[in-house]
């Protein structure tokens, strides 16, 4: 990575850049294609993806999550959303009440089928998650023009360091729908915990446990 790049937490003002980047990074993602449709060709699918990513970004400020990004000057090159280990249920309870208010408009923006599929995905992946306290990598994406330049690897290294510095965390859990990603994560030290499906879309649930 170039020394001029900086990695920092995103603020609420970064929301448009986050939604734009993730929309492009996940436009051909198998799960996104199945749940929302082809956002590159279908305007309805594009609006649904925008609504979902906007909700995901706002949710991170209410719950036990953080959004980090890599910048080249003011240009966002990559970003990831991570849920930290829960040390107290109180913040999530408070955030949960506020989250209900955010969910109401989302219900009118997404179809019933889409909401059911998203709920099924969350249920499947959380069931496969390890019982020990961990960071959960919700999403990670790189701007198409910046792919292959070490942006994703740098974000993962940052997450590894964050996990290492957190005495509450025993590792990282993540899920991917791309089979080719499995080998990439295995090279970083992850193991395949479970392989499942949401309808016909494969889901690979992976974990990294520190101090093994």
Image (tube, grey):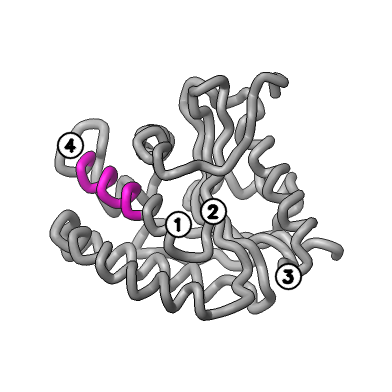
The foreground one among 189 and 96 is 96
> Mark 4, mark 3: which one is toward the viewer?
3
Q: Can you tell which mark lies on residue 66?
A: 2
First in residue order: circle 4 vs circle 2: 4
Q: Is residue 179 above or below residue 212?
A: above
Give the CA separation, mark 2 to mark 3: 16 Å
Check disc 1 and report its element: helix, strand or loop: helix
Q: Which residue is mark 4?
A: 42
> Mark 1, mark 4: which one is toward the viewer?
1
Labels 2 and 3 touching (C-beta < 8 A): no
Labels 3 and 1 touching (C-beta < 8 A): no
Give the CA separation, mark 1 to mark 2: 6 Å
Q: Which residues are magenta?
A: 46-55
Q: Is residue 165 left or right of residue 84?
A: right
Give the CA separation, mark 4 to mark 3: 43 Å
Give the CA separation, mark 3 to mark 1: 19 Å
The crowd level at tag 3 (other Cα within 10 Å; few <14, some 14-19, many 20+) is some
Give the CA separation, mark 1 to mark 4: 27 Å
First in residue order: circle 1 vs circle 2: 1
User: What secondary structure is the stretch in magenta mostly built from?
Assistant: helix
Q: Which residue is mark 3?
A: 168
Q: Position of residue 184 (x, y in %)?
A: 66, 43
Q: Is residue 100 above or below residue 162?
A: below
Check disc 2 and report its element: helix, strand or loop: strand
> Mark 4, mark 2: which one is toward the viewer?
2
The crowd level at tag 1 (other Cα within 10 Å; few <14, some 14-19, many 20+) is some
The crowd level at tag 4 (other Cα within 10 Å; few <14, some 14-19, many 20+) is few
Q: Which residue is mark 1?
A: 60
Q: Is residue 35 left or right of residue 89?
A: left
The crowd level at tag 2 (other Cα within 10 Å; few <14, some 14-19, many 20+) is many
């Amino acid at each position: 990575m170039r020394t001029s790049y900086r990695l920092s937490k995103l603020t609420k003002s970064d929301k448009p850049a986050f939604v734009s980047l993730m929309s492009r990074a996940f436009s051909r993602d198998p799960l996104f294609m199945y749940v929302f449709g082809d956002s590159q060709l279908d305007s309805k699918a594009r609006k649904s993806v925008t609504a979902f990513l906007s909700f995901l970004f706002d949710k991170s400020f209410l719950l036990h999550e953080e959004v980090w990004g890599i910048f080249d000057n003011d240009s966002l090159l990559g970003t990831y959303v991570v849920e930290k280990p829960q040390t107290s249920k109180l913040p999530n309870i408070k955030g949960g009440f506020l989250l209900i208010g955010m969910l109401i408009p989302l219900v009118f923006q997404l179809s019933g089928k889409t909401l059911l599929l998203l709920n099924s995905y969350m249920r499947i992946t959380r069931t496969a998650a390890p019982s020990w306290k961990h960071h959960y990598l919700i999403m990670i994406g790189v701007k198409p023009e910046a792919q292959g330049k070490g942006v994703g690897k740098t974000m993962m290294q940052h997450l590894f360091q964050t996990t290492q510095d957190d005495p509450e965390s025993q590792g990282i859990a993540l899920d991917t729908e791309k089979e080719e990603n499995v080998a990439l994560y295995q090279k970083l030290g992850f193991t395949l915990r479970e392989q499942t499906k949401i309808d016909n879309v494969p889901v690979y649930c992976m974990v990294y446990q520190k101090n093994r």
